[in-house]
């Protein structure tokens, strides 16, 4: 973060990372280094939250950048919602700054204990809604998304499964050419 | 397009432009009847449908608040979205996935077939199946339903191959790519299905039938339709004679208007239909319009539903292909030996990646279970249970006077206590669905809980006896002779078929009846 940026009072924290070389995200991104500015959360709160989102939806080979996007989305939603900001910040405070560096088993147990709280449920919902909706996730999970612009999946693999017998015509229908 | 004056008391006013309202509007206008069609939502088109799932949801879904209570899991999982319907020209036929099975003959006589089931309000339909069948055939031809009247079925996708082989291996016989209102070739001035799997986001080829690009433009072409978009009906008024005579609505700017009416047809999709009738309370109808027997909003049904997923170690790519093109019909029977009354369909169902964790699995799943599940996205197959749920008079839509919409009106509150019959049926269906996938080598299976209600039925049901329902077999309100219910609210019981074909069939029947009655000056 350069000094001119530091002068913006609105920046409360920052998350940075380096994309795994050769991974699907690195191929999409303009550069391997990334940094995300936070508007409400501190850098340490951001790091705890990022670790929490990874504990909720763990994908070992998925870059931290994808999780940082979730943190960014949650951080953005706090700006106009004081109640939510209180819920998230006090929740993160209770998890403590050691959370992110604890082993997964410990993190899971800590989250299990707070599963019923508004804090956990909000973060869980936001994680699920954000993590899998980005082009980064599409690439990682192999989801091809909309296909109208390419003529659909007709002729592009909608019926290319070979590991099971074909369905007889009477129970399916002719493939249009 | 016609321009009908606000004080033209000769107008027929239809509220809601979905499966029921859109079809009815076309059928009346083509017979020369002048119709004002009020639609709360905006108008989209094949060109404007978003191909981003989250954005499409925002573009089409009814997001005005609704609240919920009761023992159903939706109260915990989707408190803000207990029922999933659309708010757009064409209604939920823009969102829908096109499955058009028929209700079975024994399902329209459920009270007789199942006998008295404690804690339910089952009734027989006030209509003969043979008559319904006639309108089913008309509706199927109109919607170009696959595998009916000489039309072929849709081709089998990868996703269906998994369901098919699993189903056959456990002995199911009636398994095919389904009856869908989806074009297998260009017909009806619409495109054909290109297997893109974005049926829920709005079909950009028009292969999937929707009133948005069939019934409504055809009604407009007659010159007899005055479609008013982003116009939200807030109240139906009546005269001292107890007959409906006007509809109050708010336009996009929030300005209030009053449209005089000779006849009013309500087609707002069960939840909102009940709400509008309840909101139309007056000195003469203190509990809401057409509600003298306290039946409006009761017997709300939404089908016993839920996803079943199979995870495999080989590629499937379930998102490629028509979303719902596959069905197992063998459990669609009444066989009390299974431990419950009524039957269910198992229907192929894919979800796009962003929607899967939100709609497809219980919200209690997180951590490594979630990670494992999601990482099988390309090796996963899914199906939906669609089972008959039991009508109960206490499962109902009421007004929540503590929560208001942007017009300051009480929102709909949905209360559901699932009947033990629903629970037993879901458990059976989940076992069977898991067995289907295990038979073709699933390494793991997973089930969801009840999904938000995409099928909404029964809140103004047809009944022979006015004490049991809101309208007669033509959808005419028992209490108000020129008030008709024209959507899924009229289904006397839900059966196990996805409701839209039945809604369209009943709308065709109602249109014939209304035009005859108007000509004979009976209304
Ligand atoms: C994702 C999804 C998939 C589905 N798939 C299938 C399927 O495969 N097969 C099937 O049979 N069914 C399916 N359905 C259900 C099907 O879409 C509905 O059963 C059907 O559209 C209901 O028709 P309707 O006329 O009752 O209401 P709708 O089609 O919902 O139309 C009601 C219209 O009324 C408008 N409205 C409501 N209140 C007011 C008011 N006060 N003033 C003005 N306008 C108002 C609404 O904006 C809406 O446009 C699906 C639904 C969803 C959500
Ligand atoms: S899969 Fe077929 S019906 Fe569905 S959106 Fe694509 S073209 Fe339309």
Image: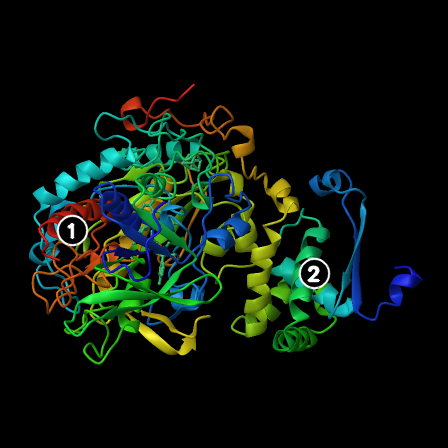
Q: CA distance from mark 1 to mark 2?
A: 57 Å
Q: Residue B162, how many percent across, how many down?
A: 39, 34
* Image quarter of residue B211: top left
Residue B472 visible in rendering:
yes
Q: Nearer the viewer, residue B318 or B146?
A: B146
The subunit carrying tag 1 is B
Mark 2 surroundings within 10 Å by alpha-carbon count, few (fewer than 14), some (14 through 19), many (20 or more): many
> In this rendering, is residue B209 above or below B127?
above
Looking at the image, residue A68 sits to the left or right of residue B389; the answer is right
Q: Mark 1 — residue? A: B514
> In this rendering, is residue B39 above or below B239?
above
Q: Quadrant of the C terminus of chain B?
A: bottom left
Q: Residue B147, how many percent across, how many down?
A: 26, 30
Count of marks, rendered view:
2
Q: Quadrant of the N terminus of chain B?
A: top left
Q: Mark 2 — residue? A: A72
Q: Residue at x 73, y 65 (%)?
A: A46
* Quadrant of the rendered image holding ligand 2: top left
Q: Nearer the viewer, residue A15 or B376?
A: A15
Residue farthest toward the top in the current orientation of the protein: A177
The reply to whether callout 1 and callout 2 are in contact (CB within 8 Å) is no
* Image quarter of residue B212: top left
Q: Residue B353, how many percent across, how many down?
A: 53, 46
The subunit carrying tag 2 is A
Whether the residue under disc 1 has CB within 8 Å of ligand 1 = no
* Image quarter of residue A71: bottom right
Q: How is the image coloured?
A: rainbow
Looking at the image, residue B167 sits to the left or right of residue B332; the answer is right
Q: Secondary structure at mark 1?
A: helix
Mark 1 surroundings within 10 Å by alpha-carbon count, few (fewer than 14), some (14 through 19), many (20 or more): many
> In this rendering, is residue B154 above or below B470?
above
Q: Secondary structure at mark 2?
A: helix
């Amino acid at each position: 973060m350069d000094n001119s940026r530091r002068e913006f009072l609105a920046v409360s924290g920052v998350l940075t990372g380096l994309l795994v070389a050769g991974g699907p995200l690195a191929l999409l991104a303009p550069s391997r280094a990334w940094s995300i500015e936070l508007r409400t959360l501190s850098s340490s709160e951001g790091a705890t939250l990022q670790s929490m989102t990874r504990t909720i939806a763990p994908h070992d080979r998925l870059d931290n950048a994808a999780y940082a996007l979730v943190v960014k989305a949650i951080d953005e939603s706090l700006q106009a919602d004081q109640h939510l900001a209180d819920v998230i910040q006090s929740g993160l405070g209770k998890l403590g700054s050691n959370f992110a560096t604890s082993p997964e088993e410990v993190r899971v147990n800590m989250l299990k204990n707070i599963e019923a709280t508004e804090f956990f449920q909000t973060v869980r919902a936001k994680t699920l809604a954000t993590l899998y909706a980005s082009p980064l996730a599409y690439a990682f999970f192999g989801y091809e998304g909309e296909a109208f612009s390419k003529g659909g999946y007709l002729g592009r693999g909608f019926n290319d499964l070979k590991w099971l017998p074909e369905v007889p015509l009477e129970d399916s229908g002719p493939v249009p050419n | 397009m016609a321009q009908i004056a606000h004080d033209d008391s000769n107008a027929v006013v239809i509220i809601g432009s979905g499966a029921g309202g859109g079809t009815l509007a076309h059928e009346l206008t083509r017979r020369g009847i002048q119709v004002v069609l009020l639609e709360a939502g905006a108008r989209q088109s094949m060109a404007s449908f978003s191909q981003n799932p989250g954005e499409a949801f925002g573009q089409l879904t009814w997001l005005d608040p609704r609240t919920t209570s009761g023992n159903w899991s939706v109260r915990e999982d989707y408190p803000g979205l207990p029922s999933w319907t659309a708010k757009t020209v064409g209604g939920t036929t823009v969102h829908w996935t096109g499955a058009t099975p028929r209700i079975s003959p024994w399902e329209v006589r459920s009270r007789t077939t199942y006998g008295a089931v404690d804690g339910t309000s089952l009734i027989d339909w006030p209509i003969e199946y043979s008559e319904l069948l006639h309108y089913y055939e008309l509706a199927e031809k109109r919607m170009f339903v696959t595998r009916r009247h000489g039309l072929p079925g849709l081709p089998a996708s990868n996703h269906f191959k998994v369901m098919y082989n699993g189903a056959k291996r456990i002995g199911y016989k009636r398994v095919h790519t389904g009856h869908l209102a989806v074009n297998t070739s260009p017909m009806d001035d619409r495109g054909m299905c290109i297997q893109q799997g974005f049926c829920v986001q709005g079909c950009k080829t028009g292969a999937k039938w929707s009133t948005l690009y069939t019934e409504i433009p055809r009604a407009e072409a007659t010159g007899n339709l005055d479609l008013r978009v982003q116009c939200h009906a807030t109240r139906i008024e009546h005269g001292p004679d107890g007959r409906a005579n006007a509809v109050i609505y708010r336009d996009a700017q929030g300005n209030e208007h009053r449209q005089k009416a000779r006849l009013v047809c309500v087609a707002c999709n069960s939840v909102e239909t009940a709400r509008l009738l309840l909101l139309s309370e007056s000195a003469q109808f203190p509990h809401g319009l057409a509600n003298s027997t306290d039946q409006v909003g009761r017997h709300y049904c939404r089908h016993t539903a839920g996803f079943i997923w199979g995870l495999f170690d080989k590629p499937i790519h379930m998102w490629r292909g028509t979303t719902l093109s596959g069905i197992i019909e063998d459990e669609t029977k009444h066989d009390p030996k299974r431990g419950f009354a009524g039957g269910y369909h198992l229907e192929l169902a894919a979800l796009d990646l962003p929607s899967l964790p939100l709609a497809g699995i219980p919200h209690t799943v997180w951590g490594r279970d979630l990670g494992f599940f999601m990482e099988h996205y390309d090796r996963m197959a899914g199906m939906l249970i669609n089972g008959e749920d039991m009508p109960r008079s206490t499962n109902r839509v009421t007004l929540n006077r503590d929560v208001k919409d942007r017009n300051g009106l009480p929102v709909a509150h949905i209360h559901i206590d699932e009947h033990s019959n629903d629970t037993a049926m879901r458990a059976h269906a989940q076992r069977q669905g898991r067995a289907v996938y295990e038979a073709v080598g699933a390494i793991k299976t997973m089930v969801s809980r009840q999904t938000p209600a995409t099928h909404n039925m029964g809140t103004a049901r047809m009944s022979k006896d006015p004490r049991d329902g809101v309208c007669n077999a033509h959808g005419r309100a028992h209490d108000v002779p020129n008030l008709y219910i024209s959507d899924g609210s009229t289904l006397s019981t839900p059966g196990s078929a996805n409701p839209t074909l039945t809604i369209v069939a009943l709308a065709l029947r109602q249109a014939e009846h209304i035009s005859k009655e108007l000509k004979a000056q009976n209304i």
